[in-house]
Amino acid sequence: MARYVANRLAQAIMLLVIVSAIGFALLHLAPGGPLSQFAASAQMTQEDLDRVRSQLGLDRPLPIQYLDWFGRMLKGDWGRSYRDGEAVLSVISSHLGATLELMTTATIIAVLLGCWIGVLGALRRYSLFDTLATVGAMIALSIPTFWFGLVTIYVFSVKLGWLPAGNRETIGDGSPLDLLHHLIAPALVLALVETAMWGRFMRSSMLEVINQDYIRTARAKGMPEWRILTVHALRNALLPMITVAGLQFPTLLGGALVAETVFTWPGMGRLFLDSIGYRDYPVVMGILMFSAIMVLIGSLLADILYAVVDPRIRVG
Amino acid sequence: MTTAVLSTDQLAPGQAAWRRFRRHRLALAGALIILVLVLGSALGPYLLPFDDTYIDIMKRFAPPLSGAHILGTDELGRDVLARLMMGARVSLSIGIIAMVIAMAVGIAVGAFAGFYGGVVGAVLMRLVDAVLCFPTIFLLLALAALTEPGFVTTTVLIAATAWMWVARVVEAQVRSLREREFAVAALAFGSSNLRIMFRELVPNAMAPIVVAATLNVAKAILLESYLSYLGYGIQPPAASLGNMLNNAQIYLTSAPWLAIAPGVAITLAVTSFNFLGDGLRDALDPRMNIP
């Protein structure tokens, strides 16, 4: 087990180095570059630009800049926002809570609903419910999240007036009930795609399990059907879902960005878009790296957790 | 030839695949809708009396089915149907061209990594893993913000964030196929490595490649809509299905039809390509059963 974890950890660290090199190269080699924000101002002379360049250390060779940047990143110094000079990591962390709140709620909805739909679909394969669920999942995966958000706002905020059209809280209120009220729409919108994914994976995982020999054996020895389903089938069918959680993470993060934009939710995704608008490279770079690291850690945790619950993985 | 002996009542692989595909009614419906969308966006603008960028401020916000404008007009009095057709033309083109680029890059990377294996393969596939760590929309937006927005940029950027899955599929296929007899035989004949890769191995992996290509178009259309909706894709006055929704949110209360038509069009196009890909997967390779 320790060897498996060490092995997997080494892989993740190697990947982190490649990821950071890609991110760094992308933003530095692109036209415009980190100085574009200053170069755009008419009051900046060439002299000023040169001075800013050397002050920010942008005149050094790129590999040196990268090593310097990577070293500081490990120490938690992710640079400062061009916009207001605040430390990048603290800008990100001040927006992270809202994003995590949204993602967690959406995931809970998606896991519960998706697994339920998937299991039921697998048990009644090719029934009307299964067909509708399969087609519905495919449509759900094809709807642009932002558009579904717009439709939700139109129906539930504009027409029915049940839910607020955006933001995380009513200014001056902010009670738990008010927060929950604002959370419903964006969380449901974000959960749509996730539910469809979980449903599809759960269905195929369950189908695989209920055709196994040990299920037949359990039936043959006269075990009650509900016990076969819960103890034998469901438990084994849920195992691969750990991997799905890891695989789904990038999609979930991307979806959160879109949902946050539509519902003016003050999270990391909105911050990212705003920072792009301002050409605030340290923050853009920081969030890009931060999201990639989250994905890396997510898949690492999923793999380790899977090995813990399923010994076949760490041996094979 | 021994075909006379072998072909007693066995169908040719192509025929069997066509049979399986025909049974997949949703895939057929998808193919049909794609055909309608392509024809509609290619020919529609010539049949309509309105130009998609013609501004008529006397006729702003005309609701659908009022007078000559079937789908109404937008905030500048432009005909929504005309814009929808031109937008679909742009979005479908981007979807298909981005798919072609992504396939070319993905097949090249996957074939090299799968064929050579070892250090070359490991380096290429770790690169694929690393790029996959970036959530697509984040990567796409960061890249889009650094470049001049437009048709070419949008297409290339979408391809740049979509080739990795293809590379993975092709790498796995090529890695297993290169040990097979026909590949070894080609090597014995003295074929060059490149010839073996692209004349022997890749054509034999066509089934999953075609499926990946179809699903890739769906993904590319969706990504274009995200990018343009957020303002970093196709720029007005040109229309795309995504940028038509860009300021539909502002007029959601007063003119909801501005948000409905493009959204339905995107969903229809993406769903169709997804169903088509699903049907092709069932038809071409019955063993593949990825959800």
Image (cartoon, coloured by chain):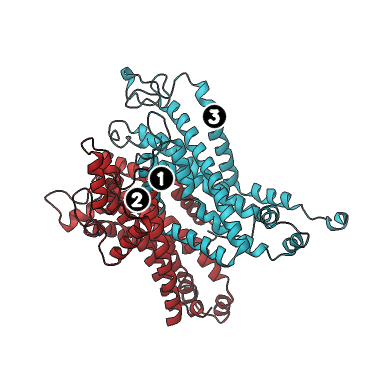
Chain colours: A red, B cyan
Question: Mark 3 or mark 2, which is nearer to you?
Answer: 3
The residue positioned 39% from the left and 53% from the top of the image is: A192
The Cα–Cα distance between marks 1 and 2, rounded to whole angstroms, is 10 Å
Q: Quadrant of residue B9?
A: bottom right
Co-location on one chain, circles 3 and 2:
no
CA distance for labels 3 and 2 = 33 Å
Find disc 3 in the rendering and name its residue. Answer: B42
Q: Could you say where residue A117 lies in the image, as x and y percent from the top left?
A: 44, 60
Q: Label 2 is placed on what type of residue?
A: Val
Q: Is residue B76 visible?
A: yes
The N terminus of chain A sits in image quarter? bottom left
Residue drawn 39% across and 21% down? B54
Q: Nearer the viewer, mark 3 or mark 1?
A: 3
Q: Nearer the viewer, residue A286 or B119?
A: B119
Residue B170 appears in the picture as rendered: no
Q: Which quadrant would residue A262 be assigned to in this image?
A: top left
- The residue to which callout 2 is attached is A189
**Which disc number belongs to residue B179?**
none
Label 2's element? helix
Residue drawn at the location 18% of the way across and 53% of the way down: A178
Chain of the residue where label 1 is placed in the rendered structure: A
**Residue to which mark 1 is pinned:** A144
Give the residue type at disc 3: Ala
Percent coordinates x, y for residue B115 in the rendering: 63, 61
Which tag is nearer the camera, tag 1 or tag 2?
1
Quadrant where the image shows the C terminus of chain A: bottom right
Q: Amino acid at mark 1?
A: Pro
